[in-house]
Image (tube, rainbow, N blue to C red):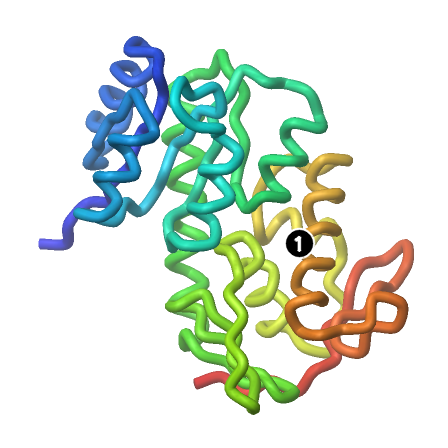
Amino acid sequence: MMMQPLVAILDDEPEIRRMLAQALCDAGFRTATYARAAEFEAALKRSAPDVCLVDLGLPDRDGLALVHRLALESGATIIIISGRAQVQDRVTGLELGADDYIIKPFDPAEVVARIRARLRRGRNAVGAAPDTARFNGWTAHFERYLLVSDAGAEVAFSHAEGEVLRLFLDSPKRLITRAQMQESLGGMAGESFDRAMDVRISRLRTKLGEDPRNPRLIKTIYGAGYIFLGDVVWG
């Protein structure tokens, strides 16, 4: 029997932890709950969750810094749950590597639905292509979140950056519109999503050694979207 996905819940409010854990257990997920970042990080050394729900207002650690570390070091889906409702807070969270941002107060059913959608997209992505792609002097190892150049240089990328990179590598030399990106990657369309995509693409260009004034691989088609111009070989 396949083991159910594990969802780690990090929030210092006991009622939030209880409410989310109950809803997720009822939906068939395994859960682990933590009130402080220290105990959450200690648990990560023992087991790897499939999804991390992270509150930003933690008593012992900056929540955004933790999200950024998770994005760089973990393969988990990262969803921020926060009372911070400003657009800039959402943009910053997504820029630092979160896959989604849910504002408190929320309906637990929405959280369950968002988690299911994220995991479904992840399974579809894995089933659609192998975990390794070669293109223009680089090899992308999606299972390791690592880019390796032909010269042997290694550059890590985050889970969120990997989603965008896989989208490009799956559709080389084809226009990908903002609407298609939003549909494929999820999240609410609008300014915060657009800015988060801009940042992720900018970071990918930097990691690929692109000239920001004249990128040769990821081209911006103003008013339309993006085109990835590399030659891609999967497997």
Neighbourhood count class around disc 1 (C-alpha, 10 Å): few under 14, some 14–19, many 20 upward: many
Indicate the position of residue 48 as horizontal and vertical percent values.
Answer: 25, 49
Instruction: Say what amino acid the circle numbered 1 marks.
Output: Arg
Please give the name of the residue rendered at 66% of the width and 64% of the height, measured from the top-left corner: 204
Which of the 4 image quadrants contains residue 29? top left
Q: Tell me if residue 121 comes above or below residue 190 in the rendering.
A: below
Left or right of 78 in this view: 184: right
Instruction: Looking at the picture, tell me which residue is in the foreground, 70 or 143.
Output: 70
Can the viewer see residue 57 in this picture? yes
Q: Which residue is mark 1?
A: 200
Please give the name of the residue rendered at 54% of the width and 31% of the height, measured from the top-left corner: 101
Q: Residue furthest left?
A: 1
Indicate the position of residue 231 as horizontal and vertical percent values.
Answer: 66, 87
Indicate the position of residue 12 as horizontal and vertical percent values.
Answer: 35, 16
Left or right of 70 in this view: 176: right
Quadrant including the C terminus: bottom left
Indicate the position of residue 23 as horizontal and vertical percent values.
Answer: 28, 22
Left or right of 135 in this view: 117: left
Please give the name of the residue rendered at 52% of the width and 26% of the height, measured from the top-left corner: 102
